[in-house]
Image (cartoon, helix red, strand yellow):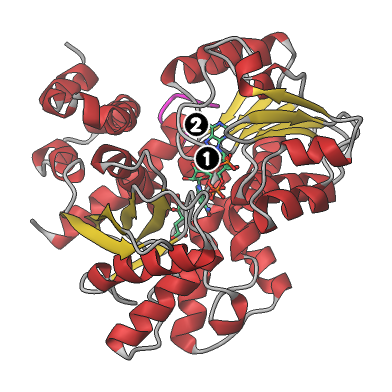
Amino acid sequence: MTIAEEEIRKFENHNCAENNVFYQAMEEVIYSIAPLLQSDEKYRKHGIMERLVVPDRVIKFKVTWLDDNNIIQVNTGYRIQFNNALGPYKGGLRFHPTVNEGVLKFLGFEQILKNSLTGLHIGGAKGGSDFDPKGKSDFEVMKFCSAYMTELHKYIGARIDVPAGDIGVGSREIGYLFGEYKKITSTYEGVLTGKPFFFGGSLMRPEATGYGAVYFTESMLEMEGKEPLMGKVCTVSGAGNVAVHAIEKLTQIGAVPVACSDSKGTIYDSRGIDVELLKDIKLNKRQSLTKYAEVHAEAKYIPIEEYPEGGHAVWDIPCYAAFPCATQNELTEIDAQNLINNGCVSVTEGANMPSTPEAISLLQSHKVCFAPAKAANAGGVVVSEFEMSQNAAMSKWGFAKVDERLKETMQMICKRVALTAKDYGVEGNYVDGANIAGFKKVADAMIAEGI
Ligand SMILES: NC(=O)C1=CN([C@@H]2O[C@H](COP(=O)(O)OP(=O)(O)OC[C@H]3O[C@@H](n4cnc5c(N)ncnc54)[C@H](OP(=O)(O)O)[C@@H]3O)[C@@H](O)[C@H]2O)C=CC1
Ligand SMILES: O=C(O)CCC(=O)C(=O)O
């Protein structure tokens, strides 16, 4: 039995329906770090993996709120504080009907290694609720956020745990959450990141994840001796915060992002996505992508049900570089095969774990440059940490400073991941490089801090 199989066997009890995405994330990490466990026995001796896969605490609570018809609604709220060996717990909040403990455990676990890779002092956490902001009035969203914070405030703080946004949580929700925290605690502190700029947010936090993914890709393509993105056709899934800003940065650097998608369908606009229109439709008005095709008649809208099951229209459009930026397991083996058939050279994960394990293996075996989420989408949490620093110092950084430091950090992460892969005999495998480099730093801190 290999060391990876031996380790995986230990954690078989995590393999159940509720935990399937968590188990997927954990299994990938174990396979990647097996050479490290083999070469340095201290990690097994100190039971690092056993300690890392169990969160420090899982906070689960009831959220009761009144809708606009004065009907009582009940949701479940969570905060999973996974590991704070490297700094205060840090990670986003997701409001989506699919949220459960298993989903948040996968996201929190990934966040530990992602935050470690940034080189900054931040631990890993994730939280959220099964509340669905879609179709709710502003007032209902505010009431839900207040009720959620009534419970959450007991467990967070600027040096304890600093939540941010994720799916369904943007600056509107962070504003309401911050307002409630301030009211309950009478404290004006950097307890949340992703705040609107005029009351303590950092410039560029909304753009950071999408821009960072593009910076990472440029760096990876250069390191792998491939042509840069300028002039190249790109496809992006999703049409939320991460996707829109990836499209914006691609456009700024002269690439041609021709497609994006939402939960109902895909837009293909061969002239390049009109990013201002996309922002207005999806980020400001929270409408469907069908509106895009109503304005630009040349663009094609493909409803999700019109594409054969198992694959997604957005990955069947020829591109040089693909950016999955919607949600977990949205890029399947079928999609990977379509990308390969159409000559795709690189795939960058803007979303968390958007590619299935089968898709990753296929892409890697066809030498497609593959940038895993925990490295490529770290830009968001990087600028969140910049926001924490600015809040602690009561200062404001300019756009150029944030952008320059974000770019430098993404390039540093890319180099670190590539060099680690090389050191461990898996040159070009950014998945293994990211997992080993991220794991090693947290594990060393855990050993140094004792049990
Ligand atoms: N926000 C951030 O800073 C960071 C986010 N991430 C990750 O990036 C991803 C996207 O997050 P974010 O942009 O913030 O979230 P948003 O809520 O802003 O947007 C999510 C987008 O994805 C679309 N979507 C959801 N499910 C599907 C699906 N099955 N197929 C196609 N599209 C889908 C949504 O469509 P619709 O509009 O129809 O709902 C929406 O357009 C998530 O995986 C998140 O964890 C990672 C790092 C940081
Ligand atoms: O900005 C943050 O704190 C976390 C962002 C996030 O949730 C993520 O990186 O997945």
Please tell me which residue lies in front, 292 or 416: 292
Instruction: Tell me: 50 left or right of 404.
Output: left
Q: Secondary structure at mark 1?
A: loop
**Label 1 near ligand 1 (CB < 8 Å):** yes
Type of amino acid under label 2: Pro
**How far from the left and from the top, in percent, is residue 187?**
34, 89
Q: Residue at x 21, y 14 (%)?
A: 2
Residue 283 occupies which quadrant of the picture?
A: bottom right
Q: Which mark is residue 69?
A: none
Residue depicted at 46% across the width and 31% down the height: 431
Q: Quadrant of the C terminus?
A: bottom left
Near-viewer residue (147 or 15):
147
Query: Relative to 6, is 240 on the left or the right?
Result: right
Tell me if residue 423 comes above or below residue 96 in the rendering. above
Can residue 41 be seen at all in this image of the molecule?
Answer: yes
Is residue 399 or residue 171 the one in the foreground?
A: 171
Q: Residue at label 1? A: 351
Image quadrant of ligand 1 equals top right
Q: Image quadrant of residue 13?
A: top left
Give the residues drawn in magenta, as a range. Answer: 421-428
Q: Main secondary structure of the magenta part?
A: loop
Instruction: Where is residue 332? Give x, y as percent.
Output: 51, 18
Residue 423 drawn in magenta: yes
Amino acid at pointer 1 = Ala
**Which residue is under mark 2?**
354
Callouts 2 and 1 close, C-beta under 8 Å: yes
CB of residue at label 2: within 8 Å of ligand 1?
Answer: yes
Does the magenta-highlighted stretch encompass residue 59?
no
